[in-house]
Image: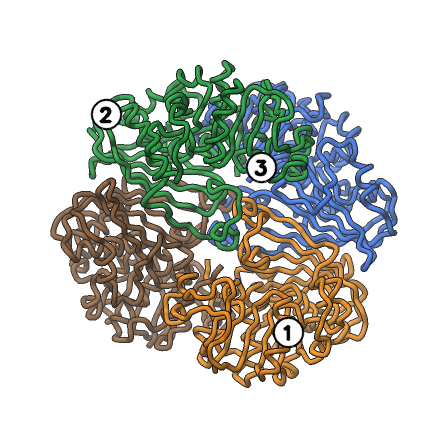
Chain colours: A orange, B blue, C brown, D green
Amino acid sequence: MKVAIYGATGYTGVELLRLLQNHPKVKVSALISQSQAGKRLRDVFPFFYGELGNLTLTEEPKEDYEVAFLCLPHEGSLELVPKLLEEGKKVIDLSGAYRLKDPSLYPHYYSFEHKHPELLEKAVYGLPEIYRERIKGASLIANPGCYPTSVLLAIYPLLKEGIKIEKIVITSLSGVSGAGRKPVQHFHFPEMFGDFFAYSLEKHRHVPEMEGVIKDLYGINVPLRFSPIVVPTSRGMLSSVSVFCEKIEPRELYMETYREEPFVKVASEPPHTKWVVGTNLCFVYPLWDHRVGCLQVVSVIDNLGKGASSQAIQNFNLMMGFEETIGLNLSLNFP
Amino acid sequence: MKVAIYGATGYTGVELLRLLQNHPKVKVSALISQSQAGKRLRDVFPFFYGELGNLTLTEEPKEDYEVAFLCLPHEGSLELVPKLLEEGKKVIDLSGAYRLKDPSLYPHYYSFEHKHPELLEKAVYGLPEIYRERIKGASLIANPGCYPTSVLLAIYPLLKEGIKIEKIVITSLSGVSGAGRKPVQHFHFPEMFGDFFAYSLEKHRHVPEMEGVIKDLYGINVPLRFSPIVVPTSRGMLSSVSVFCEKIEPRELYMETYREEPFVKVASEPPHTKWVVGTNLCFVYPLWDHRVGCLQVVSVIDNLGKGASSQAIQNFNLMMGFEETIGLNLSLNFP
Amino acid sequence: MKVAIYGATGYTGVELLRLLQNHPKVKVSALISQSQAGKRLRDVFPFFYGELGNLTLTEEPKEDYEVAFLCLPHEGSLELVPKLLEEGKKVIDLSGAYRLKDPSLYPHYYSFEHKHPELLEKAVYGLPEIYRERIKGASLIANPGCYPTSVLLAIYPLLKEGIKIEKIVITSLSGVSGAGRKPVQHFHFPEMFGDFFAYSLEKHRHVPEMEGVIKDLYGINVPLRFSPIVVPTSRGMLSSVSVFCEKIEPRELYMETYREEPFVKVASEPPHTKWVVGTNLCFVYPLWDHRVGCLQVVSVIDNLGKGASSQAIQNFNLMMGFEETIGLNLSLNFP
Amino acid sequence: MKVAIYGATGYTGVELLRLLQNHPKVKVSALISQSQAGKRLRDVFPFFYGELGNLTLTEEPKEDYEVAFLCLPHEGSLELVPKLLEEGKKVIDLSGAYRLKDPSLYPHYYSFEHKHPELLEKAVYGLPEIYRERIKGASLIANPGCYPTSVLLAIYPLLKEGIKIEKIVITSLSGVSGAGRKPVQHFHFPEMFGDFFAYSLEKHRHVPEMEGVIKDLYGINVPLRFSPIVVPTSRGMLSSVSVFCEKIEPRELYMETYREEPFVKVASEPPHTKWVVGTNLCFVYPLWDHRVGCLQVVSVIDNLGKGASSQAIQNFNLMMGFEETIGLNLSLNFP
C-alpha cells in the first residue's frame, strides 16, 4: 500500500519513516517537504543509507497513493486535509488542527478561526485504547498529542468505570524533541544541557484536547490543572497525575482495563521512560494515597512514539484492516 | 573561625568545602571521613589543588574548633550530635536526624527509634526565610531537605498571610546528585543517561518534614500529595506546586514577602534551574489559574546549594552573627 | 535454532537479547546468569514485557542448544570455552580471552596465563569484513573488541592494498556503556555527567589485538599509539586515526574496498555517532592531508552494536550459513 | 577601573561578565550589543539579578572607560580594534582577527584580506605562560583560541627546552559552547544529545595560530595534524597530543616548566575536564610511550575559561599591573 508523508523532515516525519521502512504492508511513495524539495532523503539524513534514502523529496506527490500522513504545522494541516479527503485519500493528521470537537476553542488555543468545522465532527480522535472501533471506519484521524496520550491512558480506567472525579492535577515532563526540529535559543545544546523548566502554565493547546475527551466519555467538564516541564533529554514523556475521586482499588481496575491491550502495560513499580523510548508502549502505574485520599498515577511514553508517530501507524493499521501491531514490534536501546 | 566537616567526601561535604574555602571568616581545620582517612583531600579530589587540598582527612578532629557541619547519614548524625553539643560545639546537621519535631514519626519514615527526643525541640529548622530569628540563637541547626526548601519557599507567602488552604499537590524534579555519591545500578551513567522516573510515591522522608513546618506556622495539618521524580542531570531542583486555596493575587503577595530577601527572587516568567545551579538562590513563580481556580507555583533551587550546603553556610552566618550573605556571592556557569 | 546466552544481564547480553528476539532463525532457550539466577528476565528488565521476558535466568542451561554466546568476563570465557567446544557447541565469545594469537601477551595485558593456547590458533577473529571466509567454517569465534573494530575498519583498505605504513596514531572516543554495567565511582551519573577524560594511555588490551590483526594481514609489526577517551553519553564510538604512509587517493580505495559490504559505508562528510547507534553499521571517512602528508580517517560505530553484540549476530549468521544480514535490519532513533 | 564589553550577550561575553562582577578592581561601565540594545542585562539573562543586571545594553559606550574586551565576530574585531587603539583604549580581543602574524594566511583561513597588517606585529598573543613579559607592556592583546591554548600548554615545555620534534598529531575534543550561542541545526538539543563527531578535518583556523607560535618559539615550521571533535556537553576541552621527538623524561621537565605557574598543573593521572570547568586552570599529563617511542600528552581546560574569558582576565591583570590571579580564584561545581 502506497503512502505519502507530508512534512517528512521534521522529527515526527523522520520517526514515521524509520518505522514505515520496516512495515511489511507499506511502500512510501512520496516524501513531501517544502524546505528540502529536490534533495534525496539521504542527503538530508545520511543514516537513511538504504533504498528509502534514495527517494527524492518533492513539493507534491508524483504518483498516486492511498494514505497521507501529515506531519505539518497546524495551519498546514488545516488547509490540506479537506483537499486530500476530496481526492479520496485517507488522512492521518499528526497536528492539532482536527483534534478539538468545538471549533470555538481554536482562536484562543491555536490563534486561528477553524474554517472547516464540519470536519471536526468527522475526524476521529486516534487513541485506539479508547476509540478503536471508530478508528476502524475513519477516513480522517486526528492523531493525539503526546501529553494527552500519556494523561488519558493514565486516567482512562476511571472514565470507563464512571468513577466520580472531583479534581485532576497534572504535571508532565517531556524530552526536548517534543518542541520540534527548528533550532531556537532555549533549546540550543549548551543552554538546554543540564537545564529544566516549566512553560505554558496558563494556556496549553493540549488542555482542551484532554478536557474534550473527558467530556466525551464522561459527560461533564473536569477542568484540568496542567503544568508541562521540559527536561534535558531528547525523547521520553512522564505524566504525574493526581486524581481526587471516590476511593478505589486501582491496581485491579487498571489490570482489567488494559488486559488485552498490546501496547499499554500496568507496571508493578514506577516506570522509567527508558523502558519505552523507541517503542509504541505506554506503562502506567497507579496507587491509592491513603494519607491524602487521592489516586496518584504515573505514566510513561515516548513522545515521538506512542505520543506521535508509532501511534499514527497503530491507527493506520486499524483503519486499513491490518493486524494492529504490525510494524510496531519495536525494541529499545538499553542502555 | 575554625570549623570541622564530618563526612567531607560526599557531595554535600565537597560542596561545603568549595564554598568555605572562599569564606573570609572560616578556616576549615578538620576533614572527617571514615572511608578516606589518611589521604589528603587532593588525593581524592585532584581539583582541590590549593592549600585546602593538602589537608589530610582524618577519623577524628585533631585540634579544637567551634562549629561542626555534619554531612553524615541520618544515623551517624543522630548519635554524634549530642556528643558535640556536650563538648560545646555549635552544630549544623545536614541530615534528617533532627528535622522532625515529633519523634514518633522516625520509626516509620527513617526506620529508627529517635533516642534523643529532647533535642528535637532544641533543634532549629534552618530555613532562614521562615525561622531567621530562631536560627540566630541556635546551637543546633537541622538544615532543611532539598525538596522541603523548594516547596516551603513556594508556599510560605500563603502560610505567612494565613491564606485558607484546602489541598496541596506537589510534583518535584531533582537532579541525580540528590541521591548521593554512592554508586548504584539505577544511577550508573549508561542507565540514567536519557532516563527519568518517579520514586517513593507512597512514602518519602521529606513529607513529614514539610507537613511539620506547615503545621508549626499554620496550626493545622495539611496532608501533602508529593511525587518526586529524578531527571537526567546532576544538579537542579524544580517544584511544581498546585494549591487549592481562597482566591488571591499572588504576584503582589510574593513580591511583598520576599522583597528584602537576598536569596529568594520572584521571577516574571517560569524560572530555569540553570539560573540557580551553583548558587544559594531560589526563584519562585506564582500564578493564579482562573479556569481551575487554584494557585500554581513553580520554584527552582540547586539541590546541593540552597537545598543543602550553601543554605548551611547561610545558617552558619546567621548563627555566628556574620553578615548573612558572606561567602555566598556565587556566580553560576552559563551555559 | 536454539541458542544460549551466558552472562545475559550485562550490557552486551541485553543487547544480544534485544536483537535475537526479532531474529527469525533463533530461539533463545537459555539465559545464564550467576547473579540473577532464579528471576525472570522481566523482573530484572521490565521492558522485556513479551514472551522472552518470561524466561527464567538460570545458573546452567536446562535444555540442549547449538550455539553459545558468551558475554562473560575474560576469565569466565577462558574456562568455559573448552568445555562447550567439547560438548560440540559452537561458541561466539564476546570477551578478549581468545582474541590474541600469541599466548605470551596474556600475562601482561590480561593478568592471567592462558591455559588453552591451542585454542588461540583455532579461534577465528570475528571481523567479517576481513575474515569472512574463515568465520564461515569456525566453531569458535573471538568476537572483536569495540576499539579494534572501529580502528581496523578505518585502516583495512590500506592493509588489503599493501600500502606502505610508517606510523599510526589513534585517539578513540567511547560512550560509557563500553565500561560495562557494574556501577563504579567515576561512572556514577553525577560525576560522569558533563565530564570526559582519557585513560589507559600506557597499556590497553585492545592494542595487541589490533597489532595482531595488522601483523597477520601485513606481515610486519606496526606499533600503535593509542589513546582512548570516555565521553559523556551511553553509546557510540569514534576513532580518529592518523596514518603516515605512502601517498594515496583514499576515497576511491575505500569505496572499492567496501562496495559490497552491507554494514560498512564510506561517508562523504565526517560521520556522526548518532548515525549508527542501535545498528550494526560502521561509517568511515578518509581524507589525505596534503599539508602534513598523511592519511586521516574517522570511523564511527555503536560500541554495543558493530563493536559487540550485533557483530556477534553477523558472525553467527555467517557460521550457520544464514544470510549475513538477517536480524540486523536495525533502525536508529533520530533524534 | 572602567571596562567595556563588546558583544556582551555571546557566551564569552557572559562568561566575562560572570567573572568581572566579582573582580575587585573592575567596574563594567558599558555592555555593547547590537542585537539586544535597549534591554537591561537581566531582561536577557534573568540570573544576573544583582546590580550588574540592571545595566542597559547599548550600541555604543555612553561614558569613558580604559579597557575594551571584544567578544565579537572576527570581522567585527578587525574593524573596531584600530579605532579603539586610536582613542587610546587598551584592547583585549577574543576573536582571531589579530592572532596570526602573517597577514597572507587570513584569506585562506578567515576568508578576508587583513586590512591592518601593521597591527598584527603590534598585537601580543595573550598566552601568559609563554608571553607574560610581552603582555605586561601590550596595548592590544590577541587572546588565544581555545584549541591553541590547550595544545600549546601541552607542548610548551618541549619548545622551551628546544627538544627536537619530528611530528605532532593532535585530536582535540570540545564541548558545544565552543561553537557559540547562535542556534544551528546540528547543535539543536535533540540532535546533539548523545552525538559526537569530527569536523573541519582539512582546514581549521586554529592550525596556523598554533603553527605560528611554534615557529616563533622554535624557529622552524612543524606542520600539525589536527582533528577537532565536538562532544555532547556544554563546557570542557581535552587535547590528546602525540609528539614524535627525541627521547625525554617528561614528568620532570613539565614539573619544572610549570612550577611557578598559578594556573597550569601537572597531573599525576589523566585529568578530567570536570576538574577545570568554571576555572582558569589547565591540567597537563605527559607520558613517554616506550613501545612506540613518542611523547603522549593530554591537557584539559574549560574552553570558555582558560580557553577564552578567564584567560582574557589573566591578560587584563598582567596589562594593568594587577596581581595576575585576582578575580580568578574560581571554584568549580562538583559534581
* Amino acid under disc 2: Ile
* Amino acid under disc 1: Ala
Q: In the orientation shown, which residue stands out farthest toward the left?
A: C219
Residue C274 x/y as whole percent: 42, 56
Q: Which is closer to the viewer, label 3 or label 1? A: 3
Q: Which is closer to the viewer, label 2 or label 3? A: 3
Along the viewing direction, whichever of A93 and C313 lies nearer the viewer: A93
Along the viewing direction, whichever of A49 and B310 lies nearer the viewer: A49
Residue C35 x/y as whole percent: 43, 58
Using the image, name the chain to which the residue with label 1 belongs.
A
Along the viewing direction, whichever of A287 and A75 lies nearer the viewer: A75
What's the distance in space between the residues labelled 3 and 1, CA to CA?
A: 42 Å
> Dot 2 surroundings within 10 Å: few (below 14), some, or many (20 or more)?
some
> Dot 1 surroundings within 10 Å: few (below 14), some, or many (20 or more)?
many
Q: Tell me if B69 is positioned left or right of D192 in this view.
A: right
User: Does mark 3 fall on the same chain as mark 2?
Assistant: yes
What's the distance in space between the residues labelled 2 and 3, CA to CA?
A: 43 Å
* Amino acid under disc 3: Thr
Image quadrant holding the N terminus of chain D, namely top right
Q: Which is closer to the viewer, label 2 or label 1? A: 1
- Could you say whether the residue bearing mark 2 is in a helix, strand or loop? loop
| Image vertical order of residue D261 relative to residue C88, above or below | above
| Image vertical order of residue D15 relative to residue D67, above or below | below
User: Does mark 1 fall on the same chain as mark 3?
Assistant: no
Task: Identify residue for label 3.
Answer: D9
Task: Identify residue for label 2.
Answer: D163
- Could you say whether the residue bearing mark 1 is in a helix, strand or loop? strand
User: Does mark 1 fall on the same chain as mark 2?
Assistant: no
Residue D274 x/y as whole percent: 47, 37
Q: Tell me the number on the disc at residue A142.
A: 1
What's the distance in space between the residues labelled 2 and 1, CA to CA?
A: 71 Å
In which quarter of the view is residue C127 placed? Answer: bottom left
